[in-house]
Image (cartoon, rainbow, N blue to C red):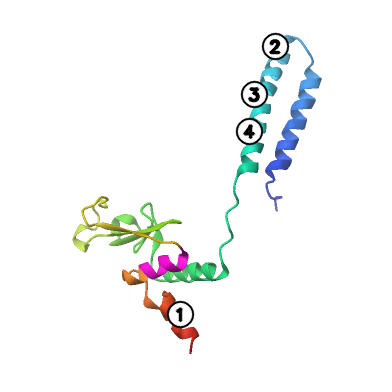
């Protein structure tokens, strides 16, 4: 089993190797010039990587209920033959055989639909009625939108889950 990648430790090791290499070569000659060039270009790069790493925001951890809901959606999708394609999640083994595809990110859900007569043809993207975008603010809301659009079963909706929990 390999150790997990630690960027800071690796950058420290690279800087130490550069310093050692710089001292070992010494002044003069072609090797010294190329080592000096290497050090000259790598040190600012390492500093920039460290700066970007320090400025990088950390993603908030998903709520446990969101993770559970995503797991339930994933199980349902796999059980019912949905796969990940270049379009997004599709209700067939490939995008060319699908009639529905769903792509979602942090801000919206996009649902692509096409009639069975068009299967095997290109997906239509545009304002011609072949896809719909729905702004969402949470995983629960995204799932509720997909239930309302009859993409996911009602059992995954927040209303259904609340009713079952209230029994």
> Furthest-bottom residue in view?
167
CA gap, disc 3 to disc 2?
A: 17 Å
Which residue is tagged 2? Answer: 30
Disc with the residue nearer the chain's start (4 vs 1) = 4
Which residue is tagged 1? Answer: 161
- Of badges 3 and 1, nearer the viewer stands 1
Residue 65, percent across and down?
A: 54, 71
Disc with the residue nearer the chain's start (4 vs 3) = 3
Residue 92, percent across and down?
A: 34, 62
CA gap, disc 1 to disc 2?
A: 72 Å
Circle 4 packing at 10 Å, graded few (<14), some (14-19), many (20+), is few
Q: What residue is rendered at 70% in x and 18% in y?
A: 36
CA gap, disc 2 to disc 4?
A: 28 Å
Disc with the residue nearer the chain's start (2 vs 4) = 2
Q: What residue is rendered at 41% in x and 78% in y?
A: 159
Which numbered circle lies on residue 48?
4
> Is-magenta flag for residue 140?
yes
Of residues 40 and 160, which is closer to you in this image?
Answer: 160
Question: Which span of residues is magenta-colored?
Answer: 138-145
Of residues 29 and 59, which is closer to you in this image?
Answer: 59
């Amino acid at each position: 089993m390999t150790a997990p990648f630690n960027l800071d430790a690796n950058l420290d090791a690279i800087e130490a190797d550069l310093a050692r290499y710089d001292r070992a070569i010494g002044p003069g000659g072609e090797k010294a010039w190329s080592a000096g060039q290497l050090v000259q270009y790598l040190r600012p790069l390492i500093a920039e990587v460290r700066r970007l790493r320090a400025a990088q925001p950390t993603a908030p951890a998903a709520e446990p209920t969101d993770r559970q809901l995503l797991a339930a959606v994933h199980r349902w999708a796999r059980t019912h033959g949905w796969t990940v394609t270049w379009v997004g999640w599709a209700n067939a083994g490939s995008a060319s055989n699908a009639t529905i595809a769903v792509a979602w990110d942090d801000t919206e859900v996009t649902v692509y639909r096409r009639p069975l007569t068009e299967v095997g043809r290109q997906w239509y993207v545009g304002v011609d009625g072949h896809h719909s975008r729905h702004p969402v603010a949470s995983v629960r809301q995204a799932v509720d939108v997909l239930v309302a659009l009859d993409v996911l079963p009602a059992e995954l909706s927040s209303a259904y889950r609340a009713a079952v929990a209230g029994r």
